[in-house]
C-alpha cells in the first residue's frame, strides 16, 4: 500500500462524528452488497449511513430494460437526498464505489455543501486490462439504434481472491446478482455511464470537497489513469490517494478490503465539523505506477 498525501494534516486527530451523515453509492446496476463491511464500519464509528436505491441506476434498472436513463436524473436523485440530510445533520459526505465514485464526483462538482467524498475504484475511463477492445464502440452501436442488449460480466468479476471469485461466480449464476453487482449490464445504462464519465472529466476542477481516492494498480476495469487524473485535476485543497497492490476493481470485498474499510472510516472521522478551513495543498508528487494491462495480455 502506498499512501500519497497532498497536505500536512495531523493523521492522529479524531474529529467528532456527531451530526455527520454519509451516503453510500454502489456501482452501476448494483446494490449495497458491493460496499462490503464499509457500511457497518461507518455506523460503528458513529456515522448515520444512507444507501439510496437510485431509479434506473441501481439493481431495479434490470427490471426496466426498455428505459433509457439520463445520468442527470441520477445526480438529481442523490442531490435531493443531500439537501434533505443537510437539514438534519451538520455535514454530509459521500462514499462511492466504481461508477458510484464517478457519480460522487459529479455531485461534488455541482454541490459545494458536500463535506468530503471517498472514491473507491473511481471510473473515468473504461481502460482496464480486462475491458474488451470493442467497448469503445458502444456509443456508435447505440446511435445506430442497437440498444436492447446487455454486457455480460465475466471472470475475474473484479476480484483477485480466487475463493471469493468462485463464490461470486456461483451467486451470479444462481441469482443474477452478487457482491460485485449484476451478472449483466444493459447497454442503455452503460451509455448513460459513459456520458457521466465524460461530464466528470471536464468538470474535475469544480470539485472542492475533501477527497480520498483508493484504487488498485491492478484494476481490470479502470486503470490507474482514472485515479491519477482525479488527483491531478480536482480543485480540492485536501486530497489523498491510496494505491492497493493485491486486489482488482471491487476493492471492498477483495484481498485488501480491511485496508479499504479502515482508511475510509478514518478519513471520514478526521472530517470533523464539515466546512472548516483547510491548508492549501502543495504540488503533488506523482508516483510511478506499473500498468499491468500489457503484462496480462502477454500472459494470455
Image (cartoon, helix red, strand yellow):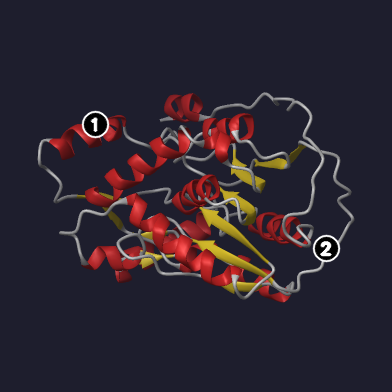
Q: Residue at x 38, y 48 (%)?
A: 155
Task: Please tell me how crowded label 1 is: few (under 14), some (14-19), or many (20+) other residues with Cα within 10 Å.
Answer: few
Is residue 94 something one can see in this rendering?
Answer: yes
Image spot of residue 194 (x, y percent): 34, 40
Q: Is residue 14 above or below residue 281?
A: below
Which residue does the image show at 10% across and 36% down from the upper left?
Answer: 144
Helix, strand or loop status at disc 2: loop
Residue at 71 percent across and 73 percent down: it is 19
Residue 170, disc:
none
* Residue 193 locus on image (x, y percent): 35, 46
Q: Is residue 153 visible?
A: no
Q: Is residue 96 found left or right of 9 in the rendered image?
A: left
Instruction: From the viewer's side, name the closer residue of 218 and 190.
Output: 190
In this image, 125 relative to 8: left or right? left
Separation of residues labelled 1 and 2 (CA atoms):
47 Å
- What residue is shown with label 1? 137
* Residue drawn at point x = 19 percent, y = 60 percent: 65
Which is in the foreground here, disc 1 or disc 2?
A: 2
Considering depth in this image, is 166 or 247 the residue closer to the camera?
247
Classify 10 Å Cα crowding around label 2: few (below 14), some (14-19), many (20 and above). some
Dot 1 or dot 2: first in sequence order is 2
Q: Quadrant of the N terminus?
A: top right
Quarter in which the C terminus is drawn: top left
Across and down, in percent, residue 102 comes to 48, 47
Left or right position of 247 against 41: left
Number of dots carrying numbers: 2
Are discs 1 and 2 less than 8 Å apart at CB? no
Q: Percent x, y for residue 153?
A: 33, 51
The residue identified by callout 2 is 15
Q: Secondary structure at mark 1?
A: helix
Residue 89 lies, with reference to residue 273, above or below; the image says below
Q: Residue furthest left?
A: 145
Amino acid at each position: 500500500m502506498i499512501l500519497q498525501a497532498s497536505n500536512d494534516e495531523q493523521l492522529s486527530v479524531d474529529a467528532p462524528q456527531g451530526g455527520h451523515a454519509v451516503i453510500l453509492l454502489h456501482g452501476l446496476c448494483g446494490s449495497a452488497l458491493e460496499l462490503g463491511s464499509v457500511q457497518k464500519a461507518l455506523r460503528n464509528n458513529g456515522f448515520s449511513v444512507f444507501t439510496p436505491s437510485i431509479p434506473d441506476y441501481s439493481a431495479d434498472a434490470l427490471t426496466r430494460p426498455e428505459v433509457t436513463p439520463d445520468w442527470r436524473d441520477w445526480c438529481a436523485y442523490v442531490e435531493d437526498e443531500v439537501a434533505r440530510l443537510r437539514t438534519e445533520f451538520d455535514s454530509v459526505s459521500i462514499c462511492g464505489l466504481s461508477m458510484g465514485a464517478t457519480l460522487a464526483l459529479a455531485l461534488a462538482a455541482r454541490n459545494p455543501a458536500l463535506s468530503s467524498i471517498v472514491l473507491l475504484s473511481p471510473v473515468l475511463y473504461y481502460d482496464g486490462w480486462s475491458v474488451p477492445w470493442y467497448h469503445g464502440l458502444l456509443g456508435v452501436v447505440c446511435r445506430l439504434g442497437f440498444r436492447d442488449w446487455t454486457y455480460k460480466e465475466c471472470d475475474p468479476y473484479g476480484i483477485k481472491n480466487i475463493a471469493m471469485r468462485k463464490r461470486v461466480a456461483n451467486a451470479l449464476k444462481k441469482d443474477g446478482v452478487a457482491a460485485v453487482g449484476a451478472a449483466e449490464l444493459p447497454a442503455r445504462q452503460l451509455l448513460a455511464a459513459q456520458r457521466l464519465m465524460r461530464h466528470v472529466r471536464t468538470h474535475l476542477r469544480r470539485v472542492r470537497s475533501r477527497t480520498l481516492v483508493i484504487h488498485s494498480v491492478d484494476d481490470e476495469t479502470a486503470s490507474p489513469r482514472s485515479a491519477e487524473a482525479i488527483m491531478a485535476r480536482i480543485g480540492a485543497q485536501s486530497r489523498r490517494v491510496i494505491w492497493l497492490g493485491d486486489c482488482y476493481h471491487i476493492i471492498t470485498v477483495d484481498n485488501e478490503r480491511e485496508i479499504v474499510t479502515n482508511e475510509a472510516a478514518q478519513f471520514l472521522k478526521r472530517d470533523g465539523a464539515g466546512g472548516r478551513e483547510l491548508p492549501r495543498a502543495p504540488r503533488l508528487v506523482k508516483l510511478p505506477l506499473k500498468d499491468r494491462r500489457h503484462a496480462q495480455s502477454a500472459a494470455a
